[in-house]
Each structure stands twice: as C-alpha cells, then as structure tokens.
Image (tube, rainbow, N blue to C red):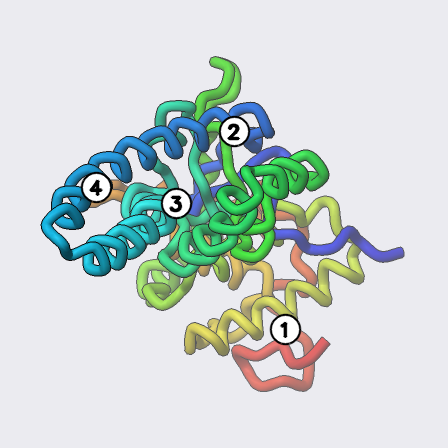
C-alpha cells in the first residue's frame, strides 16, 4: 500500500512562505475578466494620451519618429504595465487590486519578475491578439482557473477577499524537545520558499502517508535538504525531527523582528504530539550510513 503523492500545495488552500495557511479560492472567469477589463480601460486611456501627444510630433513632420515612439509606448503599456505592477506590488495590478485578486506561484510564494514576464508575453497573444477568447477558454477548462500564461509560469490567481469564516490560521513548527539549541543555530537563509513548501507539505501530511511511503520520503527529503543547504544533521536524530528543525528554523528566520520563538515542547515521551512516530527511533539511527546521513532509500 502506498501513500498519496507528496504535493506541496494543500488541498484546503495556500501556505505562504511565512508559514500561514490561507483559506483562499482561485479567481474564476468572471472576476478575472472584470479585473482585466479595468486594466485594459486604464491602458486605453494612457495610450490615448500618448497618441495625442505624439500626434503633435507627427504634425511637425516627424511622422516616422512618432510612429516608432508609439509602438514602443504601446508595448510598454500593454506588456510592461502588468509585468512591472505584478513584480513590484505582490502580484497585483490596479484592476486586480480593485477586485481583490492577486497572482501567486503554485506553491503560494510571491511572484518574481520571471513569472510576471512569462504571463505578460503570453497575455499579448491570449488576451490582446485574440480579444481574450483563448485566455477565457483556458480559465474555464483548467482545474485551478489558469490561463496559458499561468500554466507556463507556474502561477495561479487568488481571490483575497473571502467570507468572514475563512480567516488565516497560523501554522507553527516547534523545535522538537532537546533540539532547541540546534534549531537556533541552523542557518536556513539560503532556503527558498519552494524548498520550504515541500518540507512543510511533508510534515503536515504525515498522518496521510503509509509507513513505507513516509519512511522513504523522510529519508529522501532529509538528505536532499541537508545537502542543498549544507547542513549537518545531529547524530542520532531521525529524518522527520531533522525536517521539523529545519521548518522551525525557517519560520524563525522569516518571523517579524522582535517576535519570540514559540515555546518548546515539554519532555513527554518522544515524539512530540504534533509529530506522529518518526520513521526511525530517535536514539537508534539506521545502521550503515555515517552519523548525520540516512543513506539512500
């Protein structure tokens, strides 16, 4: 019997890199269309003003110069506007903000310039050259209401304004008992939001995995995390507590200044209540690999 595949996106919503579980819903065709129409209206107004100004230039005899300038301006307004706004304003444009929408990565992280650039280039075709028909069809047919640009960039559009009952719920990973000092000394500055999302997803789905799948994933993920971040796991610590240490350290690293770390678990019988039994007994690492490594699985 095998457990479900490891998916960094929880079924109930999106977990941000700051470790907050947000009960959001994806934006559907209606809200996305309304937001896009607002942005297009703004772009038309700006292009109209630019065209009027360049008309004066063309009237003076510099028709070619005015035409070239208008083409450049049109590209900047049509493609550059959404790319710049989404990159600098946490996935929003003026139209999206008015409708309470925001673009995020499929892992729940903030979009970067590369995500917005891919969306903007695809939008030139699927929104403007086809009058939105291709984008609308893609949003309707895809499970997470994604247009082609979203599918290519690995992004989704969320509706931030939800019902009062759908509030953010803090999800905190606490240092396993006896490993508080190790968590405090961990350097996870190089850990990306995508890497954290996978570790967090595994820890949150321990109860859903079969023993075999859980043990194999714990070893694979712990070894990969230690290698990528150049971390040395404590001798005698099983893969799952090590991953819990990494998650707790990541949350501390991204916590607002002045935030106290959550209290450590009291010393009940191992493991702490938040973590089901680890793949290996904490004081008896599997024989074979050197200390701090769990070997291939």
For the question of whether residue 177 can be seen, the reply is no
Q: Residue furthest top?
A: 164
Q: Secondary structure at mark 1?
A: loop
Q: Which residue is mark 3?
A: 18
Q: Alpha-carbon distance for marks 3 and 1?
A: 31 Å
Q: Secondary structure at mark 3?
A: loop
Q: Is residue 72 left or right of residue 127?
A: left
Q: Which residue is mark 4?
A: 50
Q: Residue at x 49, y 48 (%)?
A: 123
Q: Alpha-carbon distance for marks 2 and 3?
A: 30 Å
Q: Alpha-carbon distance for marks 4 and 3?
A: 42 Å
Query: Closer to the N terminus: mark 2 or mark 1?
Result: 2
Using the image as rendered, state which of residue 106 and residue 255 is in the foreground.
106
Of discs 4 and 3, which sits in the foreground? Answer: 4
Q: Residue at x 67, y 38 (%)?
A: 137
Q: Which mark is residue 33?
A: 2
Q: Residues within 10 Å of mark 3 (few under 14, many from 20)?
A: many
Q: Is residue 281 above or below residue 80?
A: below
Q: Is residue 274 left or right of residue 248?
A: right
Give how far across and how far down residue 292 sits, in percent.
Answer: 52, 78
Give how far across and how far down residue 41 sits, in percent.
Answer: 36, 29
Q: Residues within 10 Å of mark 2 (few under 14, many from 20)?
A: some
Q: Which residue is mark 1?
A: 285
Query: Closer to the N terminus: mark 2 or mark 3?
Result: 3
Q: Alpha-carbon distance for marks 2 and 1?
A: 56 Å
Query: Closer to the N terminus: mark 2 or mark 4?
Result: 2
């Amino acid at each position: 019997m095998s457990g479900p595949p490891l998916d960094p996106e929880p079924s109930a919503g999106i977990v941000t890199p700051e470790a907050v579980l947000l009960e959001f819903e994806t934006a559907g065709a209606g809200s996305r269309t309304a937001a896009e129409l607002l942005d297009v209206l703004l772009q038309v107004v700006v292009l109209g003003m630019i065209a009027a100004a360049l008309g004066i230039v063309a009237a003076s005899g510099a028709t070619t110069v005015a035409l070239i300038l208008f083409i450049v301006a049109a590209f900047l307004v049509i493609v550059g506007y959404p790319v710049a706004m989404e990159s600098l304003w946490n996935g929003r444009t003026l139209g999206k903000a008015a409708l309470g929408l925001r673009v995020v990565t499929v892992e729940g992280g903030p979009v970067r310039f590369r995500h917005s650039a891919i969306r903007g280039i695809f939008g030139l075709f699927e929104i403007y050259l086809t009058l939105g028909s291709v984008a609308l069809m893609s949003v309707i047919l895809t499970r997470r209401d994604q247009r082609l640009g979203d599918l290519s960039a690995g992004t989704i559009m969320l509706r931030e304004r939800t019902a009062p009952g759908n509030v953010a719920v803090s999800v905190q990973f606490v240092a396993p008992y006896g490993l508080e000092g190790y968590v405090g000394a961990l350097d996870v500055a190089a850990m990306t939001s995508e890497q954290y999302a996978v570790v967090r997803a595994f820890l949150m789905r321990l109860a859903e995995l079969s023993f075999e799948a859980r043990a194999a994933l714990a070893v694979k993920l712990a070894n990969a995390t230690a290698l990528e971040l150049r971390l040395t796991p404590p001798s005698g610590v099983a893969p799952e507590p090590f991953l819990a240490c990494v998650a707790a350290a990541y949350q501390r690293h991204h916590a607002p200044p002045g935030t106290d770390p959550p209290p450590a678990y009291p010393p009940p019988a191992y493991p702490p209540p938040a973590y089901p039994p680890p793949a290996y007994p904490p004081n008896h690492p599997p024989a074979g690999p050197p200390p701090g490594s769990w070997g291939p699985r």
